[in-house]
Image: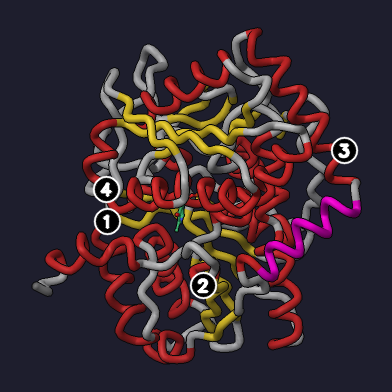
Amino acid sequence: MKQNNDKKVENLPTQAGFFGEYGGRFVPPQLTEALIEVEEAYLDAKKDESFQQEFRRLLKHFVGHPSPLYLAQNLTSKYGGAQIYLKREDLNHTGAHKINHTIGEALLAKRMGKTKLLAETGAGQHGVALATAAALLGLECEIHMGAIDVAKQHPNVLRMQLLGAKVVTVKSGGRCLKDAVDSAFATFIADHEHTFFGIGSVVGPHPYPMMVRDFQSIVGEEAREQILEQEGRLPDNLIACVGGGSNAMGLFAAFLNDPVSMTGVEPGGRSFKPGDHAATLTLGKPGTLHGMFTYLLQDDQGEPLPVHSIASGLDYPGVGPQHSYFKDSGRVEYVTATDKEALKAFSILSRTEGIIPALESAHAVAHAIKLSPTLKKDKVIIVNLSGRGDKDVDYVAPLLGIE
Ligand SMILES: *Cc1c(COP(=O)(O)O)cnc(C)c1O
């Protein structure tokens, strides 16, 4: 597909939080006021030099930025085509990109005089990142998590507790992520005076898709500077996995007005049958969920469909509204990688480069090793390695025949 990458991208979202027709703020009236408060505080903090300096200081000295941009020479020679660079967000404190936006959210909460961070979590990655930021900045933290996820992701539950967070086990409904979201929203409505809702991706009602994107944009800003320094030119392709879309948006944001192709990789799972994947942009239709209008995997009644991915951080039936806009405008191409392809990429990257990637990030690597051999050797691909795979080894080892 020919990508529409000459077109200048306007400064989105609009004041009402729309990216084209997507985004917005579709919430019950009790929440509107609380969201306007967040929006106003964020727009004010964005202009405030001291807020930005403190955010950048913590990203540098606490998280470990700038993360390296690493030319994966072994992987590149194995496939014989375009050079593959890895943006090493796996090296961040806590092992993934999520810490970038949770620190931004915690700083904003403090600035607003809030005493508590509240969120839902699925696999627990966002909960751990938020609990880390809460501990750092002296805030209380309450994380809602479905009972099934609590049982499946026990190490992350322990991490959150060690970091001082209260973990609320949600026993209603399907006892998974969606039920945790409903439970956390209800708590927020009851106490938004003292509480800041820390959303875990570029999803939800305005201003979250914009705000989380801005906090994550450090990734693309660094990568752009680093590739200019190392190659003396811009890359040809950017590749990132897409769950809610925050690590992808963080990388893409700095290159939107450049002649650079961008690919978001969705989880193709076991098959394209409903319930077997979470390829929202590839197979979904627009609708409203969690306060936003965006592509969704939904049934005829507009109810979210069950989703699956080998990478629990990617199994979400929605996607950030800016990605929906980029899909329709053609600025970004969205493809899928299956569970099998991700698993294979996980193994290959571990063995060829000595880097064990998160299963989420392995989807992006899987696409890079498909694309590289189709391009000339002087082309440059940057893959966002959004996280490290330590969390996945117990699950992956038997699948790869390792006891
Ligand atoms: C949560 C997670 C993702 C998916 O979230 P996005 O918002 O799409 O970035 C990807 N990679 C890792 C390592 C994660 O923890």
The amino acid marked with disc number 4 is His
Instruction: Estimate the spatial distance between the alpha carbons at disc 3 and disc 4, rounded to whole Å.
Output: 39 Å
Badge 3 or badge 1: first in the primary sequence = 3
Circle on res. 44: 3
Marks 3,4: beta carbons within 8 A: no
Looking at the picture, how far across and down is residue 115, in whole percent? 65, 33
SS of the residue at dot 4? helix
Sort mark 4 into few (<14), some (14-19) or many (20+) by Cα contacts within 10 Å. Answer: few
Instruction: Estimate the spatial distance between the alpha carbons at disc 2 and disc 3, rounded to whole Å.
Output: 31 Å
SS of the residue at dot 2? helix
Looking at the picture, how far across and down is residue 191, in whole percent? 59, 18
With 400 as the anchor, is 177 left or right in this view?
right
Circle on res. 154: 4
Looking at the picture, how far across and down is residue 285, in whole percent? 47, 28
SS of the residue at dot 1? helix
Is 401 part of what is drawn in magenta? no
* Disc 2: which residue: 91
Residue occupying the point 60% across, 69% down: 237
* Disc 1: which residue: 339
Badge 1 or badge 2: first in the primary sequence = 2
Residue occupying the point 52% across, 80% down: 84
Residue occupying the point 42% across, 91% down: 74
Badge 2 or badge 3: first in the primary sequence = 3
With 351 as the anchor, is 281 left or right in this view?
right
